[in-house]
Image (cartoon, rainbow, N blue to C red):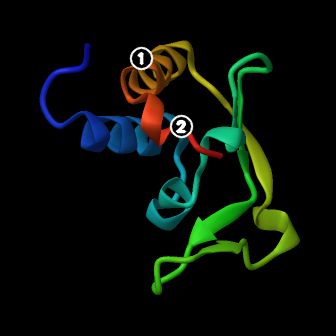
Amino acid sequence: MLEGDEESRAIVATALFTGLRAMEVLGLVWGDVDFAAGEVHVRYQLSRKGERVPLKTKAAKRDIMLMPALGKLLRRWRLSHPRRTRQ
């Protein structure tokens, strides 16, 4: 089980391990995390209005390698919060 504020820990770890911008991290959903391929698919970001919107340019779309430590943390987070696993 994760200690402390689990959601904040998962968000900060995702930002640190992937190098994504804050609004890109906040725009991720579980469907963007491909555990099998070991990738995070960056296709959307969170807008200032709190809506999930496409990235501004085609060049911003990318796949980021899912570091093993981050994958482990995210799997634990997902398993410990089954109601929050919607796509």
Q: Quick check: 20 left or right of 82?
A: right
Asked which quadrant contains residue 56, the reply is bottom right
Query: Is residue 54 placed above or below 20 in the rendered structure?
Result: below
Q: Residues within 10 Å of mark 1 (few under 14, many from 20)?
A: some
Amino acid under label 1? Answer: Arg
Q: Earlier in the sequence, mark 2 or mark 1?
A: 1
For the point 45% across and 41% down, which residue is it? 84
Residue that mark 1 sits on? 76
- Mark 2 burial class by Cα count in 10 Å: few <14, some 14-19, many 20+: few
Mark 2 against mark 1, which lies toward the viewer? 2
Measured as percent of width and height from the top left, residue 68 is found at 55, 13
Label 2 close to label 1 by CB (< 8 Å) = no
Location of mark 2 (residue) = 85
- The amino acid at mark 2 is Thr
Element at badge 1?
Answer: helix
Residue drawn at the location 80% of the way across and 76% of the way down: 57
